[in-house]
Image (cartoon, grey):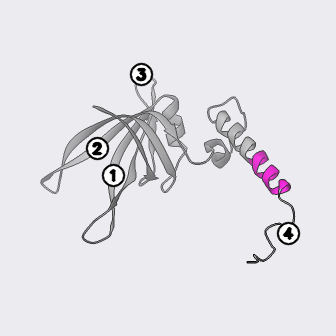
Amino acid sequence: MLSALITGSIASDPKHGTSKTGTEWANCVVRVPCGQNRETGDQESAFVQVAAFGDEAGKLARLTKGDSLSAQGSLKPTTYTKDGQERHGLSLTASGILTAYGIAKKRGDGDSRKPGGADREANRAYDQFARGVNQARPAGDFDDPIMF
């Protein structure tokens, strides 16, 4: 197995559940951009099956198709059969999940001590920073024409 960090967008809504032993799990497929095809110029992508357990599963389960996601964990090649043909893929068991925005803010969790509370605090800190930047800029400072 390889240690990997992938970043992409969720290609299918995550599936979520609890195992017989009580462990929370979630999985989904993530579309990871891999650059452009040299001949056609088309964007190429890899589709990675991502599985998460415990607290990370809760984070993954709150997301939906199209959301941005970065996941860190153990990556391994997989083989499966589709339409009678053997195909190859990638599977990542996530030890860490990170999103581009606060999960708690998107889903509206009420208690900052619940999972996602750190995301809420990060969003508040960013909002305060953004207000400070807007207040620090003098009115009209960037509206004047450039003179040469």
Give residue 125's quadrant in the image: top right
SS state under label 4: loop
Q: CA distance from mark 4 to mark 1?
A: 47 Å
Question: Which quadrant of the figure contains the N terminus?
Answer: top left
Residue 135 is covered by the magenta coloring:
yes
Identify the residue under disc 4: 140
Q: Amino acid at mark 4?
A: Gly
SS state under label 2: strand
Q: Which residues are magenta?
A: 127-136
Residue situated in front as seen by the camera: 51 or 139: 139
Identify the residue under disc 1: 47
Upstream in sequence: badge 3 or badge 1: 3
Give residue 94's quadrant in the image: top left
SS state under label 1: strand
Q: CA distance from mark 3 to mark 1?
A: 29 Å
Upstream in sequence: badge 4 or badge 1: 1
Upstream in sequence: badge 4 or badge 2: 2
The structure residue drawn at horizontal position 83% and vertical position 66%, both measured from the top left corner, is 141
The answer to whether 111 is drawn above or below residue 37 in the figure is: above
The structure residue drawn at horizontal position 83% and vertical position 58%, both measured from the top left corner, is 137
Q: Which mark is residue 90?
A: 2
Number of marks present in the image shown: 4
